Amino acid sequence: HARLALLPGTFWRGGFGIVAAVVMYDFCDYWLHRTSHESSLFWAAHAVHHQSEHFNFSTALRQESFYSVMGAPFFLPMALAGVPTAQYALAGAVVLLYQFWIHTEHIGRLGWLDRVFSTPSNHRVHHAVNPGYLDRNYGAIFVIWDRLFGSFAEETEPCVYGTVKPLASWNPLAAVGQFYAELWRRMRATPRLADKLRVLVKSPGWMPPGVAPSDIPAERRLSQPRFDPPASGWARLAAIAVFTLTAAAAGLWLWVADDLGAAANLAATAALAAGLWFAGWLLSRRA
């Protein structure tokens, strides 16, 4: 209803229009992604995608909490440009699926492609906690945006993955809530209302006056071993079984969720969260 009819609707349904929609989506996603690293409240939702200390396809599947809700305003320019809903959804799917294959250490440098596209080499930098790599290479498909707006870094040294403050837990609820809890700690620790609000909007590393930082020094973080507590063989097998059953239950739930009431969906959510928590508990030292 608010679109600016600069182009006819038929344009977006053609090949050039679909390509244009993908490029527009990627550009909007760049700014959402960059904000998600430079503003604490957005980082709290995005952090779960970066907590893995490995870099593989499973890392790509770590999806963020509240991300679609908080990120929606960043894509309003596409609505104003008149991109139809179907082409918007297609562009989003293309950008999302493209990002899956770049989460790997098995593909090295790709020459000129590394200068134009987001490739495994460029994305390894994005997931690394090396001081020279932090907050770099946000582009989903095109790394050109990073080159234009000063956020590009080339892969020059081995990457250490994870977050500056490691999660050090297999608890999925702790993973989702880790940085929300940190924001709450910072807000409680400062008496000034203005500083409480700044905690939410300033960078994730910003601390109110008088609040001690919780991050690990860079030199110690880079030499820190990966979180891998010992677990017995039976615990590992049990965790695999629980995780497999939980994944199957999640698929079944998604199949019937639209036909269930709110109470049933909340109960299913709680049951799945409990299953994931139990799988993590089996692999922890407490088990």
Image (cartoon, helix red, strand yellow):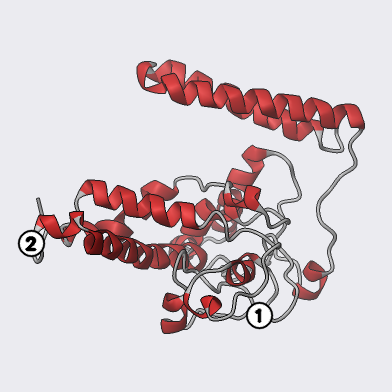
Q: Residue 146 carries which label?
A: none
Q: Circle 1: is it few (<14), some (14-19), or many (20+) Cα within 10 Å?
A: some
On the image, the x and y values in percent for residue 106 come to 71, 62
Q: Determine the secondary structure under disc 1.
A: loop
On the image, the x and y values in percent for residue 182 come to 61, 54
Q: Distance between the residues labelled 2 and 1?
A: 44 Å
Q: In which quarter of the image is residue 246?
A: top right
Residues 173 and 248: in front is 248
Rendered residue at 41%/67% (across/down): 30
The number of numbered badges drawn on the structure is 2
Q: Mark 2 points at which residue?
A: 5
Would you say 236 lies left or right of 63 here?
right
Q: From the image, which quarter does the C terminus lie in?
A: top right
**Vertical placement of 37 versus 66: above or below?**
below
On the image, the x and y values in percent for residue 216 come to 75, 66
Say which amino acid is labelled 1. Answer: Gly
Q: Name the residue under label 1.
A: 132
Residues 16 and 129: in front is 16
